[in-house]
Image (tube, rainbow, N blue to C red):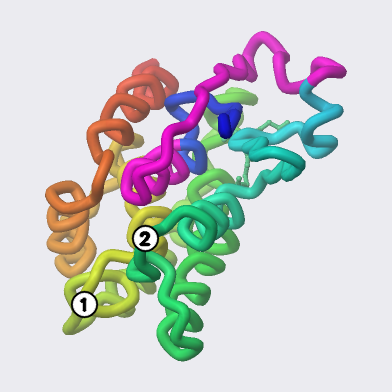
């Protein structure tokens, strides 16, 4: 069965799903959605996802959006093991905490600081910059004494967080003040399946920050 995947290579949540699919060994039928051309607002796409966001996945009767929900679905439905999203409630709780932290805090604060500058030519807001620094500081603390974001092995927490942190890096945010994050980031780059797909997407993403 074909899994349709509506995406843009540069989008951080899309990059996270691409890496997850690679890690799980699932092939996605890639369908580009050009946000700048308004593809996501066309009736045929709104019919699939009324919220008109990417990433969006269609697998049989299931239309699914929200990157972290898609990632969890791919592992649960197609993963040969549960290592990326452990079934054990205690382990899964920690992975979930990191997934929600990424969505509600780390990635959210990135968008709050950078996107008005990029898309609305608004001036930088130093208060929002401090919030971003605080969020990366939280991640640095979570990583104290452990190799990966939710313990000693790679999980969906790392995949979503590395998509976000690589966006910070690409935007020119200085990670050198966060040694645990730097070490973990290097480890993720070397060990996350499909990290090359993230790199390729970042090349697109970078264009927004180059002028
Ligand atoms: N929390 C969502 C965020 C999705 C999102 O905001 N995607 C952006 C592109 S990166 C988008 O589709 N924007 C167009 C819109 O909201 O209409 C996720 O993780 O999937």
Q: Name the residue that disc number 1 marks.
A: 152
Using the image as rendered, state which of residue 50 and residue 169 is in the foreground: 50
Using the image as rendered, state which of residue 37 and residue 72 is in the foreground: 72
Using the image as rendered, state which of residue 24 and residue 45 is in the foreground: 24
Let me know if residue 134 appears in the view: no
Image position, residue 64 (x, y; %): 69, 45
Foreground label between 1 and 2: 2
Which residue sits at x=25%, y=40%? Answer: 195
Using the image as rendered, state which of residue 77 and residue 160 is in the foreground: 77
Report whether 87 appears left or right of 159: right
Say whether disc 1 or disc 2 marks the residue closer to the N-terminus: 2
Image position, residue 194 (x, y; %): 27, 39
Whether the residue carrying mark 1 lies under 8 Å from ligand 1 is answered with no
CB within 8 Å, label 1 to label 2: no
Which residue sits at x=50%, y=88%? Answer: 89
Which residue sits at x=79%, y=31%? Answer: 48
Quarter of image, res 207: top left
Decide: is 179 above or below 15: below
Q: Name the residue that disc number 2 marks.
A: 80
Decide: is 54 above or below 141: above
Decide: is 20 above or below 127: above
**In what element is the residue under mark 1?**
loop
Q: Is residue 25 magenta?
A: yes
Quadrant where the C terminus lies? top left
Image position, residue 27 (x, y; %): 43, 34
Q: Which mark is residue 196?
A: none
**In what element is the residue under mark 2?**
loop
Image position, residue 22 (x, y; %): 34, 42
Which residue sits at x=28%, y=42%? Answer: 169
Give the magenta part as a residue range.
15-44
Q: Ligand 1 quadrant?
A: top right
């Amino acid at each position: 069965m074909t899994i349709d995947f509506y995406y843009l290579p540069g989008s951080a949540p899309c990059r996270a799903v691409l890496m997850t699919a690679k890690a799980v060994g699932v092939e996605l039928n890639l369908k580009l959605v050009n946000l700048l051309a308004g593809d996501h607002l066309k009736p045929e796409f709104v019919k699939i996802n009324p919220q008109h966001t990417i990433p969006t996945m269609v697998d049989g009767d299931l239309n699914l959006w929200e990157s972290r929900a898609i990632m969890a679905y791919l592992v649960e439905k197609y993963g040969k093991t549960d290592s990326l999203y452990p079934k054990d409630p205690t382990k899964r709780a920690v992975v979930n905490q990191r997934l929600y932290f990424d969505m509600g805090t780390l990635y959210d604060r990135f968008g709050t600081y950078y996107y008005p500058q990029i898309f609305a030519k608004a001036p930088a807001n130093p208060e929002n910059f401090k919030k971003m620094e605080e969020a990366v500081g939280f991640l640095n603390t979570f990583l104290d004494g452990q190799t990966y974001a939710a313990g000693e092995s790679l999980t969906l927490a790392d995949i979503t967080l590395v998509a976000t942190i690589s966006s910070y890096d690409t935007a020119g945010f200085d990670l050198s003040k966060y040694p645990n994050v730097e070490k973990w980031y290097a480890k993720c780059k070397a060990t996350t399946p499909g990290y090359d797909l993230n790199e390729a997407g970042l090349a697109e993403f970078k264009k927004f920050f180059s002028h």
